[in-house]
Image (cartoon, coloured by chain):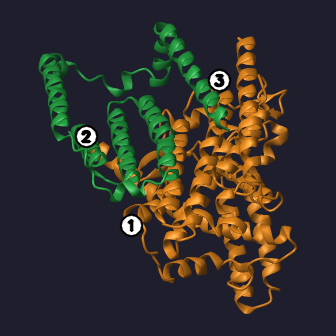
Chain colours: A orange, B green
């Protein structure tokens, strides 16, 4: 009996893993599209426009291109490490997402109720940091094994950067751990439930004991550096290092580095929303006056669907005139589904969670296309002499506040 | 049954990588196999329901210390050592040392055999959360050794910075 339960739990976990893997890879592909679009509009361009309406099929074309290009291996590489580095980067980045809880509700697979998280472990937060800390190897080994000066310098730079900023990243969340007293991500969200003065949510960013504003600042800056994104993307400073640690990689091995980078962006954004922005909790209290906010998911989908239909029927080519209204109708149907009594409560958690994650990701992209790249000595000085002391100060102030509260 | 299988998998992985660490001529590859050995040990910790120890092992050893090792090895050009013939082959000394060590371990296992195998495993649910447990013992029973160790580490850190500063 016990054995059959264990086996069915294993099957359910496997189903969840497959579904999440599919979702994450799609999300990564469209995150690239999102970034290119946002970047283009920031710079007054149109961005991808040719493949599909508004470039919506661009990720598909990119994927095919990555698969079909010649996979060149330069001479003199350390073959084992050269092949395992991109694999390591991608696998680690994706597996971190297994720890992320997407909502409070349970779903039913084969009649077994299971939460919206694959690995709900007691040390979830630490496990994610453990995975990111091992992720340095992908970059360092990729740079070293390529047998190229540019790659080696890029790999060394970025691993030095990741080691330096990892300290601030980990220290910046210590304040939250002091306030919540748990490493479990679902419990961390649950502790942020409630509203100060009836309206202001008790998210850690606005925690009544000690607002984690300093902590959020440190976390966000360190996270950008940790994922090697602009303005900290010295690993791939193209004006100095061609492309940094992945200079010698082509075709699908390059795509794996690429996927890894964007997957870790998603992880970092999810973590930011869980730790500082209350995860799946709604920003509106469920008082009678604000009851209508429960219909926000349906409303947002309906507005998007109607806008797509209106815009789509006047699109410049025939394919767009068909595809965009169809997409709009699908969104409208989803919106109708989200307003149904059985679904409306379950959809709240994932909706707010995804909204926050999308917001963080947008800021991420926004920062990239706004700030110029740091110089290497500036980067190190900033990491050790500004960010690290500020994170430490946040820990001291928070622990003082927690002790005073007691 | 599953627990045992997992244990033997990680144990075999740890021993295999430990052997590869000493037999590889390439320093970077040795370092990578050392990382694998450390990760396999972490896996054994996890199998024993010691999540906190597992995480600390991964973050500190695999993600911290070994990254610095690999970093230094990559910075220092060790290609020369790769092509040289090693002439200081000290097989005999190594053999004696490892034989003594093996005898020691065997003796330890033989002595503690009875207690080793009769300790009943605690069910996972009845255990207190790991982290609290570790913190409690560290800051309650072993406060003084802990503080001494941290001061020692601080002294070493300051010393390293001072010594590095002199050169510049």
What residue is shown with label 3?
A178
Residue A272 position in % (x across, y down): 68, 44
According to the picture, the residue beneath numbered tag 1 turns out to be A79
Where does residue A145 sit, x and y in percent of width and height? 46, 62
Q: Tell me which label, 3 or 1, sits earlier in the chain.
A: 1
Whole-angstrom CA distance, mark 2 to mark 1, is 26 Å
Residue A175, position as x, y percentages in the image: 68, 28
Q: Residue furthest right?
A: A44
Say which residue appears at 59% left-offset and 43% top-offset: A163
- Viewer-side residue, A204 vs B168: B168
Q: Against A340, is B97 above or below?
A: above
In the depicted view, which residue is nearer to us: A127 or B84? B84
Quadrant in which the N terminus of chain A is drawn: top left
Q: Pick the residue in front: B38 or A276.
A: B38
Classify 10 Å Cα crowding around label 2: few (below 14), some (14-19), many (20 and above).
some
Q: Mark 2 points at which residue?
A: B11
Could you say whether the residue bearing mark 3 is in a helix, strand or loop?
A: helix
The chain under label 3 reads A
**Same subunit: marks 2 and 3:** no
């Amino acid at each position: 009996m016990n054995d059959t339960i264990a086996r069915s739990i294993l099957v359910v976990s496997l189903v969840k893993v497959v579904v999440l893997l599919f979702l994450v890879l799609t999300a990564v592909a469209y995150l690239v599209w999102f970034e290119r679009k946002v970047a283009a509009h920031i710079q007054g361009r149109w961005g991808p426009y040719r493949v599909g309406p508004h470039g919506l099929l661009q990720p598909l074309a990119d994927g095919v291109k990555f698969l079909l290009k010649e996979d060149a291996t330069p001479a003199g590489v350390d073959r084992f490490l050269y092949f395992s580095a991109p694999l390591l980067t991608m696998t680690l980045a994706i597996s971190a997402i297994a720890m992320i809880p997407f909502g409070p509700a349970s779903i039913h697979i084969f009649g077994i109720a299971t939460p919206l998280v694959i690995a709900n472990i007691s040390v979830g937060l630490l496990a994610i940091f453990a995975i990111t800390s091992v992720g340095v190897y992908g970059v360092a080994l990729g740079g070293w094994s390529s047998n190229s000066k540019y790659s080696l310098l890029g790999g060394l730079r970025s691993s030095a950067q990741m080691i330096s900023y990892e300290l601030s990243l980990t220290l910046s969340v210590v304040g939250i751990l002091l306030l919540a007293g748990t490493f479990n991500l679902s419990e961390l969200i649950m502790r942020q439930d409630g509203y100060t003065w009836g309206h202001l949510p008790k998210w850690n960013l606005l925690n009544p004991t000690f607002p984690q504003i300093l902590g959020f600042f440190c976390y966000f800056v360190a996270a950008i550096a940790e994922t090697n994104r602009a303005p900290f993307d010295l690993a791939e400073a193209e004006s100095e290092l061609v492309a940094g640690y992945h200079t010698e990689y082509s075709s699908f091995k390059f795509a794996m580095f690429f996927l890894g980078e964007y997957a870790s962006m998603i992880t970092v954004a999810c973590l930011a929303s869980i730790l500082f922005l209350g995860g799946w909790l709604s920003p509106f209290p469920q008082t009678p006056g604000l009851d209508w906010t429960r219909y926000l998911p349906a409303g947002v989908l309906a507005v998007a669907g109607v806008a797509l239909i209106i815009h789509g029927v006047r699109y410049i080519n025939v394919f767009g005139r068909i595809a965009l209204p169809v997409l709009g109708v699908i969104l409208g149907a989803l919106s109708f589904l989200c307003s149904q009594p059985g679904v409306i409560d379950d959809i709240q958690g994932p909706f707010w969670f995804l909204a926050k994650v999308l917001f963080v990701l947008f800021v991420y992209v926004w920062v990239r296309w706004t700030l110029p790249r740091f110089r290497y000595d500036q980067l190190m000085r900033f990491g050790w002499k500004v960010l690290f002391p500020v994170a430490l100060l946040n820990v001291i102030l928070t622990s003082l506040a927690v002790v005073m509260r007691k | 049954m599953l627990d045992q299988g997992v244990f033997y998998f990680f144990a075999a992985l740890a021993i295999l990588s430990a052997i590869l660490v000493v037999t590889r001529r390439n320093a970077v590859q040795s370092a990578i196999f050392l990382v694998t050995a450390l990760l396999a040990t972490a896996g054994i910790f996890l199998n024993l329901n010691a999540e906190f120890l597992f995480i600390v092992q991964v973050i500190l050893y695999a993600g911290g210390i070994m990254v610095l090792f690999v970093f230094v090895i990559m910075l220092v050009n060790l290609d020369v050592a790769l092509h040289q013939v090693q002439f200081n082959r000290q097989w005999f000394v190594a053999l004696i040392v490892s034989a003594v060590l093996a005898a020691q371990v065997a003796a330890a296992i033989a002595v503690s055999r009875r207690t080793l195998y009769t300790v009943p495993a605690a069910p996972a649910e009845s255990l207190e959360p790991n982290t609290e447990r570790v913190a409690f013992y560290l800051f309650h029973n072993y406060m003084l050794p802990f503080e001494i160790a941290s001061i020692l580490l601080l002294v070493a850190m300051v010393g390293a910075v001072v010594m590095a500063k002199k050169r510049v």
